Amino acid sequence: MKKVLPFLFLMLPALTAGAQTRGIVPIINAWKTTDLSQTGKCRELVRYFFEHAITPGQKQSYYKEIALLKQYVRDHPDPRLKVRLMIYEFHIRLDSSFKRDFFDEAINLAYPLKDDQLNAELYLLRGSHPLSPDTRLFYNLKGIELQQKIGIRYFPYGYVPYYEVSRCLYDLGDYRKAIDYGRQFMAIYHATGSQLLPDHYVFQCDILGASFKNLNQFDSARAYYKRILQMPRPKMTNLDSTLWSGIAKGSIGQTYTQEGKYTLALPLLMNYLQAAHQLNDRLNIAMAQNAFANYYLRQGQYNKALRAARLAYDTASKYTLLPQLRDAAQYISLIDRHSNHIHEAFYYYDLYHSYKDAIREQNKKGAFSVIQAQLAFDKLQHSLAISQSVALQQRQKQQLILISISLLLVITGLLYNRKRLKDRAKLEKIAADYQNAQAEIDQARERIRFFTRLIVEKNNLIQGMEAQNRWQTPPAELQIQLLCNAIITETEWEKFREEFTKAFPHFFLRMHQNAPNITPAMERLAALIFLGLNNYQIANTLGISKDSVTRSKHRLRHLLYLSHEKTLEEYLFDL
C-alpha cells in the first residue's frame, strides 16, 4: 500500500501567479515509484514544468513549489526522495551553480537502494555533466549497459548516451567504433517516435559524416551530411540552420576535393566560408580556410593555397584551435616546400609536429578516461576495503568473539570482590568496548562485500566489452591502460598494508622471518594471494599482466624455499 501524504500537504492550496501549479502530491508519488515506469513519470514532471513555467510569474509559482518539495523531503528523510529531488532540480536548472561532486553525492545516496534504473539515470546525467568531461565515456557506457539490461523503451531519450559515446570515440580517433555507436543512435532515434531531440540528431549526423570522411568512405560521409541538409528547418530548434547548412555543404565539398571533383567542391566550400563569416564563427572560419588551402594545393595554385592557409593559421592562433593550427601549419609547410622556401618549410613543419604531438597527448589522456573514471567510481563507493574469503571472515569473527568472552570472564572474576559500583562501571565499559568491536567487525564485513562486488562489476564490465566486440580494435594507449588497471598506488598500498596488518598482525612478520630479503612488491603479491584473488584480479590490481603474476609467483616460491609438495596458497594460508 502506498504511504498517504500528510494531511498538511494534501490541503496546501494551489499556488497561482499567472498559472496554476499541479501541487506537490503527484510529484512525491512519482518520485516514490520503484517499478519500470519511474523514469518516464519523473521525466514527464520535467516536461510539464517547461510547458507551464513560461512567464516570470509562472516560474515564481513553481519556485514556491520547489520550496515545498524541499521542505517535505527534509521532514520525511528518504534517500530515494532526496535523489529524485536532486535530479529534478538539475533538469529544470533552478540553480546553475551545481557543485562538482553534486552527482557523486546523488550516486552515493542511490547506491544502497540497489535500483539499476535509478542508477542508470544518475550515470547518464553524470556522463553529460559539463564539469567532468574525463568521465563522459565511462559513465555513458555504464548507463548504456544498464539501459540494455532494463530495456531502452523505459528511458525517454535513451538514444542520447549512444551519441555521447560516439562523440568520445571520434575525439579519440576510433572512427569505426564511433560509427558503430552512431548507427545504434540512429536506430533507436528513429524507433522512438516521440520525445526526440533534433539537435542531437544533427550532431550525430556530423559525427558519422566526419568519421566516414576520415576513413575515406566519401559516399557514406556525403549521405549523412545530406541528412542535415534535408532536415526541415523548424526542427533545428536550438541550432542555426545557416551555419549547419554551411557545415554540411562544406564537408561534402571536402569529400569532392579529395576525389578531385573540384568543380563540384568549389560552390559548396564557398557557401561554408560565407556561412561561417556571416555568424562570425571562428572555429568554422578556420576550418573553411583550411579546406580552401587543401582545395588550391591539390590543384597546384600555391599562392591561393598559401593565402587561405595563413588566414586559417591566424584565426586558429587567436583562439588556440589546435587541430586547425596543425592542419594550417602542414599546408603552409607543403606550399613553402613546393615554392622552394626551405627555411619557412622547415619552420612550419616543426610547428606542425608540435601541434600534432599536443593533440596526441590530449587524445592519450582521453583514452585513459574509462579506467580513470572507473578508479574514481571505486573511490566514490568506498575508501578502503579488504577482500577476504567467507571462511576467513568467519574464522576471524569466531576468534574475536572467543577472545572477547574470555576477557570478559577473566575481568569479571578479578573484579568480583570489589565495590559493586566500580565493578558495574568497568563491566559497562567492557560491554561498550565489546559492542564497538562487534560494530567494527560488521563494518569490515560490509566493506569487504562492497569491495568484492565492485571488483566483480569492474572485471565484468571490461570482459563484457571484449565479449561484445566493443573494443575489437582498441587504441594502443587504451589497451596498455587496461593491462595497467592498478588500484593500489603507493599511497593506497600504505593504507592497504596498515589495514591488512590490523587484521592479520603476524602475516608480514612471519614472512620477513622466513624471507628477510622479501621486497614490497612480493609483499603485495603475497597479501593478494592470501585474500583469495585469482591471477586475473591480481594482474588488474597490481597493474601487470597475468604472465607477470605467474612469474612473480614463481619467484616468491623460490624466495620462500617451498618444496613441490606444498602450494604457495597453502603456505600463505598457514602463516
Image: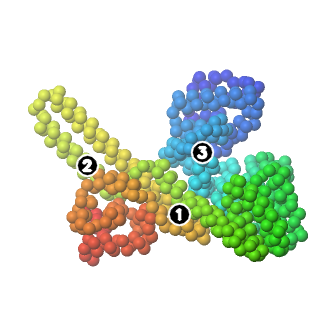
Q: Earlier in the sequence, mark 1 or mark 3?
A: 3
Q: Would residue 312 be found to the left or right of residue 120 on screen?
A: right
Looking at the rendered structure, the secondary structure element under dot 2 is helix
How many numbered dots are placed on residues in this image? 3
Q: Quadrant of residue 159?
A: bottom right
Residue at numbered disc 1? 462
Q: Residues within 10 Å of mark 1 (few under 14, many from 20)?
A: some
Identity of the residue furthest to the left in this view:
417
Residue at numbered disc 3? 35
Q: Which residue is pictured at 51% across the width and 33% down the height?
A: 77
Spatial CA span between label 1 and label 3: 29 Å
Q: Quadrant of the C terminus?
A: bottom left
Q: Amino acid at mark 2?
A: Leu
Q: Amino acid at mark 1?
A: Ile
Residue at numbered disc 2? 400
Spatial CA span between label 2 and label 3: 43 Å
Q: Quadrant of residue 46?
A: top right
Q: Would residue 167 be found to the left or right of residue 409 on screen?
A: right
Q: Would residue 397 be found to the left or right of residue 121 on screen?
A: left
Residue 5 image offset from top left, x and y in percent: 58, 29
